[in-house]
């Protein structure tokens, strides 16, 4: 056993006499290094090894998760877990369901309160709060965009779900209106759409937006070559938007020039959608 660790049985006896990092400070350290699900990941490790560092304190929420994975001795449970009870099963049910998870996490990133998220998803507000405590501890870090980019939008060490990442990023950057715009249209993505209708073109733009994210990750060199051939449509000036639809529409329209090649299928899309995108300076661009 390492010198700076102790087993569960001796934790109460020697832990109380040592000067340790307070629980809130250790929470910041673990959250910074492990990401929003730090309690879940750290609790699994502690329960597996039956040891924990003597240098840090952990809050009652963390110890309840340890108890979820490994039943603690009664005296430890009473001392460390506190009176608050987590609905771990309900929170985990959201985490393992990709659609439910996206609906909760996107709204949290769009700065909706747990009560608002609960009303829109049909979950109990306490379940949303428990989910944030266990799997998505971001409520106090929504201003830390670099940390979110590393641990939420482009997490390392897990399979990249481009749709999940794109929706979370757009919800964070665009706020509640853009978030709801995305979530309302998720069920129709991937279905056949009529490009002669505005709704059909909108669905196709969302799909192409996700595809662009895939290309950026999988084939950045090829994407760069396409951008050189076609030209980059992204303006440098800030633009004003009328509603959520236009926020998403303009963002995607500016991106499409980077991914559409000059093949026949791309030309068909460009002809159908010729007049649907405008810059603030009133120049028209095909997408």
Image: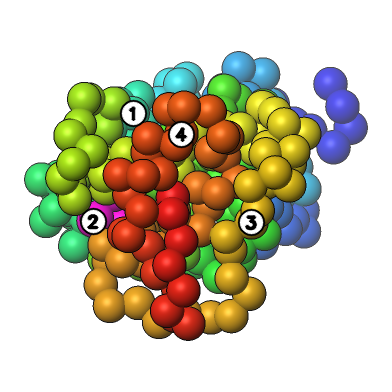
Q: What's the CA distance linking mark 3 and mark 4?
A: 16 Å
Give the labeled residue for mark 1. Answer: 98
| Residue at 57%, 23% in the rendered image | 159
* Closer to viewer: mark 3 or mark 4: 4
Give the labeled residue for mark 4. Answer: 266
Question: Residues at badges 2 and 4 in contact (C-beta under 8 Å)?
Answer: no
* Closer to viewer: mark 2 or mark 4: 4
Q: Is residue 63 magenta?
A: no
Q: Which residues make up the magenta segment?
A: 179-183
Above or below residue 263? Residue 250 is below
Q: Tell me the tag on residue 232.
A: 3
Query: How would you rate the neighbour count of disc 2 (Cα within 10 Å): few for under 14, some for 14-19, many for 20 or more?
Result: some
- Disc 4 on helix, strand or loop? helix
Query: How would you rate the neighbour count of disc 3 (Cα within 10 Å): few for under 14, some for 14-19, many for 20 or more?
Result: some
Residue 22 sits in quarter: bottom right
Q: Nearer the viewer, residue 199 or 82?
A: 199
């Amino acid at each position: 056993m390492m010198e700076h660790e102790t087993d569960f049985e001796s934790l109460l006896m020697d832990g109380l006499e040592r000067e340790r990092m307070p629980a809130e400070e250790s929470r910041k350290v673990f959250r910074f290094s492990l990401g929003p699900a730090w309690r879940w990941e750290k609790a699994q490790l502690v329960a597996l090894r039956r040891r924990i560092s003597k240098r840090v304190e952990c809050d009652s929420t963390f110890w309840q998760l340890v108890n979820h994975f490994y039943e603690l001795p009664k005296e430890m449970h009473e001392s460390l877990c506190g009176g608050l009870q987590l609905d771990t099963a309900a929170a985990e049910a959201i985490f393992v369901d990709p659609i439910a998870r996206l609906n909760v996490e996107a709204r949290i990133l769009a700065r909706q309160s747990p009560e608002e998220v609960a009303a829109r998803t049909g979950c109990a507000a306490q379940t949303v709060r428990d989910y944030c405590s266990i799997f998505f501890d971001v409520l106090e870090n929504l201003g830390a965009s670099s940390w979110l980019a590393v641990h939420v939008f482009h997490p390392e060490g897990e399979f990249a779900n481009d749709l999940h990442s794109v929706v979370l990023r757009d919800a964070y950057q665009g706020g509640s209106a853009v978030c709801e715009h995305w979530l309302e249209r998720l069920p129709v993505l991937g279905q056949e759409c009529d490009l002669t209708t505005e709704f059909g073109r909108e669905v196709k733009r969302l799909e192409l937006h996700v595809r662009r994210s895939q290309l950026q990750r999988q084939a950045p060199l090829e994407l760069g070559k396409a951008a050189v051939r076609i030209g980059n449509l992204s303006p440098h000036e800030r633009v004003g938007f009328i509603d959520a639809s236009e926020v998403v529409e303009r963002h995607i329209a500016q991106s499409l020039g980077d991914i559409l090649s000059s093949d026949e299928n791309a030309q068909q899309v460009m002809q159908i959608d010729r007049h649907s995108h405008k810059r603030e300076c009133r120049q028209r661009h095909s997408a």
